[in-house]
Each structure stands twice: as C-alpha cells, then as structure tokens.
Image (cartoon, rainbow, N blue to C red):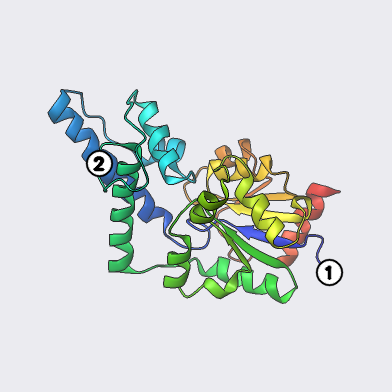
Amino acid sequence: MLFFDGVIFDLDGVITKTALIHASAWKEMFDEYLRLREERDGEAFKEFTKAKDYLTYVDGKPRYEGVRSFLESRGIHIPYGSPEDPAGKESICGLGNRKNEKFREVLEKDGVEVYTSTIELIKALKEKGARIGVASSSKNCRYVLQSADLDDLFETRVDGLVSAELGLKGKPEGDIFVKAAENLGLSPGRTVIVEDAVSGVQAGRNGGFGLVIGVSREDNEAELRKNGADVVIKDFSGVGPGQLQAWFEEKNT
C-alpha cells in the first residue's frame, strides 16, 4: 500500500521532450522581435538566452505571462492585446501567438519524443493503484499528448485551456495542481507533484503538496531545491513506486 494517493506530472521536460522545442521557439520569436526594435527604434540588440532569460522569466509559466515577464525584464512595455491577435502583432498576445506558431511547426515536422523512464514509472504507479494526472501551463498539452499517443495514461488534464476557462492562476501559484488533485478526489497533502521548472516547484510548494519532485534537465538542481523541490533527480531511470514511497515517508514523518 502506498503512503500517497496520486501523482500529478508536468508535461514539457517531464513526460515529453518538448521543453527543448519550447525554448527554441521562444528564442526565435524574441530574437526576431528584439532585432525589429534594433532596426526600427535603434535599441541595442541583446539576444534572448536559454540559461538566463528562458529559465528565469519564461519556463513553466502560461504563455502570455512568459512574454510579459521577459519584456518587463528588458524594460519593454507594449499593449497586452487579445488572445485573438494575429501571430506577431506587437502585443503580448501577438508575440505569444507567434511563439506558438513556431512550436507547432516543429511538432508537426518532427513529432513528439518522450522520456521513456517517466512513462514506465507512470505505468508502474497505476498498477499500484495510484491516481495519475497531468497539469501544464501549455495550451498545447492535449495536442502533444495525443500526438505521442499518451492521452489514455491520465485520469485528468488541467492545462492552459482549462485554466483559461476556469480562471485559474498560473504557476508559481498552485491552482492548476490543486485543481488536478480535486478532479482526482485527492487532498494535496497526500499527492506528489513532479516538475522540471522553477515556477513549477514553487507551485507545488504553494499548493501544499505532500512531496514535490524536481527533475533537473537543465543542471538547475540548486534552483529547484531553493524554490520548493523536496527531492531533485536527473531522470526517473531506475526509480519506481517504492522510491517515491520512501521519499514521501521521509518528508512526512
């Protein structure tokens, strides 16, 4: 018998290898926009970097919040606009929609790769009776899961589309994880969160979850620990339900 009742997984960088595609799409979009400001307004070009800009201001956040957060870090203020803005329009929503275009183009061309160790763990947890959900800021979550033929593994999905419909706050607030736990009939204190982003482990901590596991795909172990991860690993290779049970028991006894 497990000491926890369920596990809620983030998507990008935890289940699927789409975090790298997101990072690349963000960089292409922002560098294009920053070049435009250089040519049009005479502003010095300073490229968007993965190590600083993506991980600090964008990773794990809802798309438009990521645009706003990065632009504010550069002292750039543009209208918010509307989610219906055409891709590339000079608004927060327009730039976010341009980023999404780039992301979809790569997915349609190359498909979706998965982290097999995570999939194996999910299947082992389900055999033990654990409830399994996915929670992601991405509005592409369902599309990605269906593309990878993974949709049936999860009993609930709370993503960017669901968040918009219900008015849920994005990470680092714990809303999407709390809602996923609620959908599964679980209390946060008896639920495990798995995240690879700083904003994600902050959300797990802020939601009062029983165990927050950080997956350090970007050699950001210290940042994940500092911001709310109880345990940090590189990958789930060799990690089964018994190890999660031991971590949960150690944290909660």
Is residue 140 shown left or right of residue 116?
left
User: Residue at left 13%, top 30%?
Assistant: 39
The x, y position of residue 173, in whole percent, is 60, 40
Residue 19 visible from this viewpoint:
yes
Q: Amino acid at mark 2?
A: Lys
Q: Which residue is mark 2?
A: 89
Q: Which mark is residue 18?
A: none
Q: How many marks?
A: 2
For the N terminus, give its image quadrant.
Answer: bottom right
Eye-nearest disc, 2 or 1? 2
Q: Amino acid at mark 1?
A: Met
Q: Quadrant of residue 40?
A: top left
Quarter of the rendering containing residue 45: top left
- Residue 21 on image: x %, y %: 36, 55
> Compared to 146, does 33 lie above or below?
above
Percent from the top left, x then y, of residue 181?
A: 69, 56
The answer to which of marks 2 and 1 sits earlier in the sequence is 1
Relative to 117, say whether 203 is above or below. Answer: above
Q: Is 183 situated left or right of 111 in this image?
A: right
Residue nearer the viewer, 180 or 233: 180
Q: Which mark is residue 1?
A: 1
**Neighbourhood count class around disc 1 (C-alpha, 10 Å): few under 14, some 14–19, many 20 upward:** few
Residue drawn at 17 percent across, 28 percent down: 38
Apparent side of residue 106 relative to residue 8 in the rendered image (left or right)? left
Residue 140 at x, y percent in the picture: 43, 59
State yes or no: discs 2 and 1 in contact (Cβ < 8 Å).
Answer: no
The residue sitting at 77% across, 62% down in the picture is 5
The answer for how far apart the CA atoms under marks 2 and 1 are is: 54 Å
Q: Determine whether the residue tagged by mark 2 lies in a helix, strand or loop.
A: loop
**Furthest residue in direction left, as rendered:** 39
- The residue closer to the viewer here, 38 or 65, is 65
**103 sits to left or right of 219:** left
